[in-house]
């Protein structure tokens, strides 16, 4: 999520790299043997290729997709945050602290009328309100926060297709 400055130019992905990315995106827990078999390459080659994809930052991590409702956080919202001024210190503090707050699933620095979108899962509507008041609108530089409740979340199938 956090990036400082422009990313270095990465070598382009070849078809084998793309196949491995698609396979891992579909099943991040696939074994090296299964990945190699599906990609049509040797297991040793697969291991080297996947390690290279990680080192190059193509694969940023493998994550469990947790259902917030199942863990007691059934209220999800996307909160648009707008800063009143654009002081670098306010943005840096926000960027550093907000992703670590309880219930924050993601934070996106965006262009347009808002400066950030923060995806949050909360125990209740009251807990969501308290989160916004205690952790967002009280921050230095924050002028406005607007919450949109999420009724359904749909996950895309693949980044490459």
Image: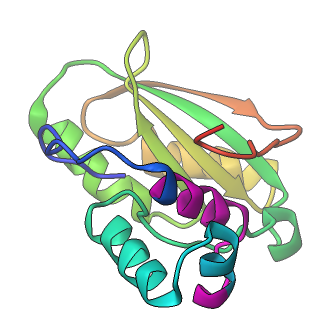
Quadrant position of residue 136 = top left
Q: Is residue 145 left or right of residue 111?
A: right
Q: Is residue 52 above or below residue 78?
A: below
Q: Is residue 79 above or below residue 44?
A: above
Q: How many marks?
A: 0
Quadrant position of residue 32 = bottom right
Q: Is residue 83 above or below residue 96?
A: above
Rendering coords of residue 24 (x, y %): 61, 67
Q: Is residue 8 left or right of residue 58?
A: left
For the rendered model, the colour scheme is rainbow
Residue at x 54%, y 67% (from the top left corner): 102
Q: Is residue 3 left or right of residue 128?
A: left
Of the pair 67 and 73, the residue shown nearer to us: 67
Residue at x 33%, y 42% (from the top left corner): 139
Rendering coords of residue 45 (x, y %): 42, 81
Residue at x 78%, y 35% (from the top left corner): 149
Q: Main secondary structure of the magenta part?
A: helix
Residue at x 52%, y 43% (from the top left corner): 133
Q: Is residue 79 above or below residue 11?
A: above
Rendering coords of residue 26 (x, y %): 72, 62
Quarter of the image for the C terminus: give it. top right
Residue 5 magenta-drawn?
Answer: no
Residue 27 magenta-drawn?
Answer: yes
Of the pair 97 and 8, the residue shown nearer to us: 8
Span of residues in magenta? 17-33
Rendering coords of residue 36 (x, y %): 60, 79
């Amino acid at each position: 999520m956090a990036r400082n400055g422009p990313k270095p130019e990465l070598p382009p992905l070849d078809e084998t790299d793309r196949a491995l990315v698609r396979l891992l995106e579909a099943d991040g827990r696939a074994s090296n043997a299964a990945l190699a078999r599906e990609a049509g390459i040797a297991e040793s080659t697969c291991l080297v290729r996947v390690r290279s994809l990680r080192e190059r930052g193509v694969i940023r991590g493998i994550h469990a997709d947790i259902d917030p409702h199942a863990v007691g956080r059934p209220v999800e919202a996307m909160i648009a945050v707008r800063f009143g001024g654009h002081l670098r210190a306010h943005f840096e503090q926000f960027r550093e602290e907000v992703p670590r707050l309880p219930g924050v699933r993601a934070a996106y620095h965006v262009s347009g009328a808002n400066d950030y979108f923060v995806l949050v899962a909360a125990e209740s509507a009251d807990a969501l309100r308290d989160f916004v008041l205690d952790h967002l609108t009280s921050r230095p530089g924050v002028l406005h926060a607007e919450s949109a409740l999420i009724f359904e979340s749909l996950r895309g199938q693949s980044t490459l297709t």
